[in-house]
Image: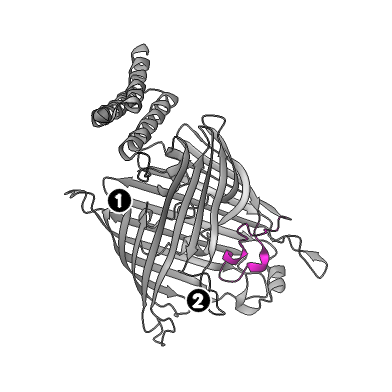
């Protein structure tokens, strides 16, 4: 143990020498620091093989991060940021995690994506399709963070959608804060988070940067059943316990005035003077004890009436949404699967509140699942950082799996989507995507489409 402590302090000594080194010796000191980082990484590998405690390994990895950050500062004079980390913090993508790798001060990151959608000229039933082809700068996002010290930081995501906040009388896009929170971590394995938070649901709602998921478009299940990107003002706890990662928050609830037969998405309040007559609980638990494997589930539960009444009846509109999910990545193989289900109480009252009749009803039950598989064909014969990942994804979903008595189901909302395509990464943080989506539904009005997209993160 004493030898290990001496080893770590010797690395710290090299860091001090680097900071005090005269210009003529700067390159030599940088090389020494690179060697120290490599030595620490070897030490982590050795201790892992010997079954060292997670706390011990975490401490050495923290020191590696500090040394690597100082190495970058010395190399650039502090003028530039380090690259987005290879691995993100639990619940955040690589770019959104940059502030966690800082020694202190400001962090900058971001991502963006542009997309071309080419729609079939005819629907399933042979009728002329109404959709027109489209080119769109879907979003440009900036991450900004500030690390106050080892125990506290601020992190934010500001999103610009569709290249404009408005055009003429028709809204074309918006600027919104998708998250903006303070983390306080007084304990090694448990922290407190407060502010605008991403709800920890599914596989996409938190990790939605384009290079992180396959396909030009996000899975339909994680847009209609889990209404991504879902964010709200709230507070709660996060942490890790052995092979388990968890997050739990209390947030402002949904607002039933936005519910439709197509789902709950417009019921999100998104922190803009959110009504808080009804609060909700959301949380998730994931097992990550096997490299490349993630297995878990998440839950949202709370009323959505926000104090509204109709004909002297209080609308509670209790919503319970849960999902179970799994992901496995190993040697170029990519597997994902998710099942999600929602139940909505007082659906008939909400229909009356929102003026919905016939087959327009809010679904008192909504569900969907998808399974996805891909393989990086460059894994067997790597060439630089290139990755070429053909993939296929199958989805089934229905936002009206059940409706209240006296209402009808719209067969167009019982859907199947088969997506096949390829994602190409010339470097880790840039992706080019092409895929074809076969869209079908029980009303035979589905319109298939071909998609091209480019995305990046930094």
The answer to whether residue 230 is seen in the rendering is: yes
Q: In the orientation shown, which residue stands out farthest toward the right?
A: 312
Q: Mark 1 points at which residue?
A: 428
Instruction: Give the residue drawn at x 40%, y 60%.
Output: 112
Instruction: Give the residue drawn at x 38%, y 84%.
Output: 122
Considering only vertical position in the picture, is 214 above or below 296?
A: below
Secondary structure of the residue carrying tag 2 is helix
The CA span between labels 1 and 2 is 39 Å
- Residue 76 location in percent, x, y? 32, 40
Query: Most prominent secondary structure in the magenta stretch?
Result: loop
Instruction: Give the residue drawn at x 35%, y 52%.
Output: 335
| Disc 1 residue crowd, few under 14, some 14–19, many 20+, Cα 10 Å | some
Q: Name the residue under label 2.
A: 412
Residue 257 counted in the magenta span? yes
Residue 306 counted in the magenta span? no
- Where are the magenta residues, as a range? 253-276
| Disc 2 residue crowd, few under 14, some 14–19, many 20+, Cα 10 Å | some
């Amino acid at each position: 143990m004493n030898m290990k402590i001496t080893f770590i302090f010797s690395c710290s000594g090299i860091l001090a020498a680097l900071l005090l080194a005269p210009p003529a010796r700067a390159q030599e000191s940088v090389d020494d620091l690179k060697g120290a980082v490599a030595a620490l990484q070897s030490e982590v590998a050795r201790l892992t093989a010997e079954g060292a405690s997670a706390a011990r390994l975490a401490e050495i990895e923290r020191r590696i991060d500090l040394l690597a950050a100082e190495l970058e500062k010395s190399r650039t004079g502090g003028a530039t940021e380090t690259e987005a980390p290879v691995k993100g913090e639990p619940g955040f993508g690589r770019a959104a995690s940059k502030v966690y790798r800082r020694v202190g001060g400001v962090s900058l990151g971001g991502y963006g994506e542009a997309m071309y959608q080419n729609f079939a000229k005819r629907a399933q039933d042979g009728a002329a399709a109404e959709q027109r082809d489209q080119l769109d700068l879907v979003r440009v996002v900036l991450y900004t963070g500030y690390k106050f010290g080892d125990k506290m930081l601020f992190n934010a995501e500001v999103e610009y959608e569709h290249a404009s906040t408005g055009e003429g009388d028709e809204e074309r896009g918006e600027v919104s804060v998708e998250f903006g929170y303070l983390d306080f971590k007084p304990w090694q394995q448990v922290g407190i988070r407060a502010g605008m938070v991403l709800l920890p649901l599914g596989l996409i709602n938190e990790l939605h940067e384009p290079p992180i998921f396959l396909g030009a478009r996000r899975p339909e299940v994680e847009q209609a059943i889990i209404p991504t990107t879902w964010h709200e003002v709230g507070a709660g706890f996060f942490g890790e316990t052995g092979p388990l990662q968890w997050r739990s928050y209390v947030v402002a609830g949904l607002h039933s005035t936005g519910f439709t037969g197509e789902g709950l998405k417009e019921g999100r309040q998104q922190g803009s003077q959110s009504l808080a007559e009804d609060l909700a609980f959301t949380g998730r638990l994931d097992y990550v004890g096997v490299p490349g494997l993630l297995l878990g589930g998440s839950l949202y539960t709370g009323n959505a009436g926000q104090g509204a009444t109709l004909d002297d009846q209080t609308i509670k509109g209790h919503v319970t949404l849960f999902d179970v999910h799994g992901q496995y990545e190993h040697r170029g193989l990519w597997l994902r699967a998710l099942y999600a289900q929602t139940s909505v109480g007082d659906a008939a009252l909400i229909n009356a509140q929102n003026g919905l009749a016939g087959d327009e009803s809010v679904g008192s039950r909504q569900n969907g699942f998808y399974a996805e598989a891909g393989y990086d064909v460059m894994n067997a014969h790597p060439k630089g950082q290139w990755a070429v990942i053909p993939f296929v994804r199958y989805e089934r979903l229905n936002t009206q799996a059940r409706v209240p008595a006296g209402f009808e189901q719209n067969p167009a909302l019982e859907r199947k989507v088969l997506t096949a395509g390829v994602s190409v990464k010339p470097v880790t943080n840039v992706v080019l995507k092409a895929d074809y989506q076969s869209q079908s539904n029980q009303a035979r009005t589905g319109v298939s489409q071909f998609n091209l997209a480019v995305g990046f993160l930094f």
